[in-house]
């Protein structure tokens, strides 16, 4: 965790606890400050060392917040925050992982019922105590009961976008250790699953003790959980990282084994058995003339590399994202694995937001950021009004028309293609929240669900996909990882309708969404739909999130030809309605 991120988290915690207490205005200011601190390009702690005035250059940081930053940097805590935590000893992250329970609700439930933990919440809801609290009801209580298991599981898992940076940093750190011959991420992180339990790191080395010592001395580590002869575990800002060390000659076998998935490994093992072979974390062995049950019994015919584990099985090496036993075994054996999309094949972004709605930058700044990132084109798609848009975020038709000349003017001076667009809301009946005549004047229309995100949403999404002005269905299920599961969708039916209508289905690359999922992408492509990978960027730095969308696409077997925004500008113009 960077120091800026560490400081930002203090103010996010402040905001949540102030919300719980019912304080007005301050929580919003603290969240804005937290975002600015996290995104500040310099060292906030270094500025704090120069005094409060030096912090003036950070957007949203006034005298009161600057004073608290200095206090935290100098003492490691903020007295007011410590007092708030004592006043509201709530496991906030866990409680608010239940859909419909935010910090304000958590605060009220603590005040009325003494609820601190998920177990407390479940017990109170099960006993009918929550519906007796003023402002709550039987429906709210049942919603909590319906979602508590999802929340408990979600609380135990990290978002890919939270865990991946830690995995990459520890791999980079270990790669510089002289005792390390090879180092790779493993497990669900290497397969780019949307959520993970922990970060698995595999090292090949003849000097396991030195590697363990280096790992447990990693500067980013908060707590060393355990340290053994050839494995160790630690936590860094709540992320558990598990290290396993093997001898270099068995690195490929161990990497294949510990990458998973379990279903993939079972299928590979069964294929090995059919050929009188044995495959495990130590290698692949010919056991045709062996009766010994020892793990290393038989002639070892592969294991130094991953490829050598697949070759004796008559298979090509399988990209980690595909290792879910969804057809990759047969494809690898028949030479039909796809050439999966790469991040550098993405040429633009067709779902972005500016300060006209809930983004942080002007149209010109966002366009400049897209060009600097290397994009050839961008669509400006600020939120329209509609269900799910609160706090004045969405633009009505009149305001969208006022925005249009600014987008066109920026486009005239830009070095890349700029499409004028909107993110319209899909109502429960499938209608679109923007006037048809206005939609016809725009270049790119993204239609997305933002409210009523439970139950079956197939009819609703199909109706939107068939609208003559809609180009993209954005984050189709509306899921928010570890917070809500989103709509149930018959992806095959939606994809068929979208393909017939010439409407693309989005992989929203925001790590909190990754919607569509990899499995849904695979179904959509098989049904003939076009996929588009967008970041939903609200500031230029968010364009870098595209890699999470690309790897989600790879989990869905997507090749460059399946993805709309691998096309050049002329191809995009041709696709847009």
Image (cartoon, rainbow, N blue to C red):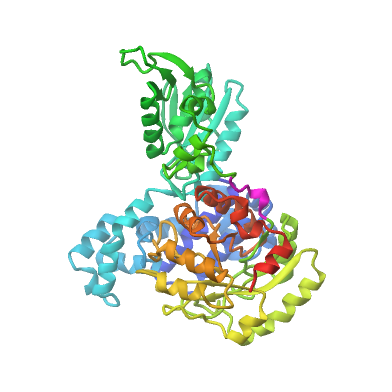
Q: Residue at x 17, y 64 (%)?
A: 127
Q: Position of residue 198 (x, y in %)?
A: 43, 41
The quarter of the image holding the C terminus is: bottom right
Check the image and report above or below for 214 versus 78: above
Q: Position of residue 532 (x, y in %)?
A: 58, 60
Residue closest to the eye, 28 or 401: 401
486 displayed left or right of 29: left
Q: Residue at x 49, y 55 (%)?
A: 526
108 displayed left or right of 525: left
Residue closest to the eye, 498 or 281: 498
The single residue placed furthest to the left in the displayed view is 127
Q: Is residue 216 visible?
A: no
Instruction: Please check the rendered image and state whether residue 243 is part of the magenta-colored stretch, yes or no.
Output: no
Instruction: Please check the rendered image and state whether residue 343 is part of the magenta-colored stretch, yes or no.
Output: yes
Check the image and report above or below for 390 versus 559: below
Q: Residue at x 50, y 37 (%)?
A: 334
Q: Residue at x 62, y 52 (%)?
A: 560
Q: Position of residue 18 (x, y in %)?
A: 44, 66
Count of number-bearing discs: 0
35 displayed left or right of 222: right
447 displayed left or right of 453: right
Task: Examine the image and state in which quarter residue 327 appears.
Answer: top left
Q: Is residue 481 visible?
A: yes
The single residue placed furthest to the front in the displayed view is 334
What residue range appears in magenta?
Answer: 340-346
Check the image and report above or below for 302 versus 442: above
Q: Position of residue 454 (x, y in %)?
A: 36, 69
The quarter of the image holding the N terminus is: top right
Task: Examine the image and state in which quarter residue 147 appears.
Answer: bottom left
Residue closest to the eye, 296 or 120: 296
């Amino acid at each position: 965790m960077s120091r800026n991120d560490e400081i930002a988290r203090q103010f996010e915690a402040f905001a949540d606890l102030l919300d719980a207490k019912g304080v007005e205005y301050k929580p919003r200011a603290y969240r804005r400050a937290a975002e600015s601190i996290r995104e500040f390009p310099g060292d906030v702690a270094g500025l704090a060392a120069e005094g409060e005035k030096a912090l003036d250059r950070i957007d949203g940081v006034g005298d009161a917040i600057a004073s608290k930053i200095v206090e935290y940097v100098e003492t490691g805590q903020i007295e007011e925050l410590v007092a708030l935590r004592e006043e509201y000893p709530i496991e906030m992250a866990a409680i608010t992982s239940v859909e419909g329970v935010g910090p304000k609700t958590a605060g009220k439930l603590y005040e009325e019922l003494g609820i601190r933990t998920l177990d407390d919440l479940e017990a109170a809801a099960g006993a009918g105590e929550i519906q007796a609290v003023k402002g709550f009801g039987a429906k709210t209580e049942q919603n909590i009961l319906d979602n508590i298991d999802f929340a408990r599981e979600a609380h135990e898992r990290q978002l890919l976008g939270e865990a991946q940076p830690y995995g990459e940093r520890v791999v980079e750190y270990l790669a510089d250790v002289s005792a390390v011959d090879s180092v790779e991420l493993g497990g669900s992180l290497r397969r780019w699953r949307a959520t993970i339990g922990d970060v698995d790191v595999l090292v090949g080395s003849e000097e396991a003790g030195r590697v363990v010592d280096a790992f447990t001395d990693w500067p980013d580590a908060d707590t060393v959980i355990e340290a053994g002869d050839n494995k160790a575990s630690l936590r860094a800002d709540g992320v558990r990282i598990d290290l396993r060390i093997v001898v270099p000659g068995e690195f490929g076998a161990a990497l294949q084994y510990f990458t998973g998935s379990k279903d993939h490994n079972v299928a590979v093992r069964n294929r090995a058995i059919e050929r009188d072979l044995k495959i495990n974390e130590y290698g692949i062995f010919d056991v045709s003339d062996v009766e010994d049950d020892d793990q290393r019994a038989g002639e070892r015919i592969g294991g130094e590399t991953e490829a050598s584990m697949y070759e004796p099985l008559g298979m090509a090496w399988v990209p980690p994202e595909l290792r879910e036993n969804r057809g990759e075994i047969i494809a690898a054996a028949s030479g039909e694995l796809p050439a999966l999309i790469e991040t550098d094949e993405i040429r633009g972004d067709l779902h972005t937001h500016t300060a006209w709605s809930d983004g942080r930058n002007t149209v010109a700044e966002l366009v400049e950021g897209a060009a600097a990132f290397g994009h050839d084109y961008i669509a400006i798609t600020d939120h329209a009004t509609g269900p799910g848009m609160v706090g004045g975020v969405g633009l009505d038709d009149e305001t969208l028309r006022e925005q249009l000349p600014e987008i066109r003017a920026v486009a005239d001076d830009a070095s890349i293609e700029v499409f004028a667009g909107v993110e319209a809301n899909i109502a429960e009946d499938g209608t679109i929240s923007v006037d048809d005549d206005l939609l016809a004047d725009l270049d790119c229309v993204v239609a997305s669900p933002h409210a009523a995100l439970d139950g079956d949403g197939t009819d609703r999404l199909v109706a939107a996909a068939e609208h003559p002005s809609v180009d993209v269905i954005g984050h189709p299920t509306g899921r928010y990882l570890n917070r809500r599961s989103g709509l149930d969708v018959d992806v095959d039916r939606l994809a068929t309708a979208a393909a017939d209508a010439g409407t693309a289905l989005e992989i929203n690359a925001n790590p909190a969404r990754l919607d569509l999922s990899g499995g849904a992408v695979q179904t959509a492509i098989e049904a003939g739909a076009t996929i588009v990978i967008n970041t939903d960027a609200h500031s230029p730095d968010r364009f870098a999130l595209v890699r999470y969308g690309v790897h989600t696409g790879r989990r869905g077997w997507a090749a460059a030809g399946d993805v709309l925004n691998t096309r050049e500008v002329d191809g995009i113009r041709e696709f847009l309605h």
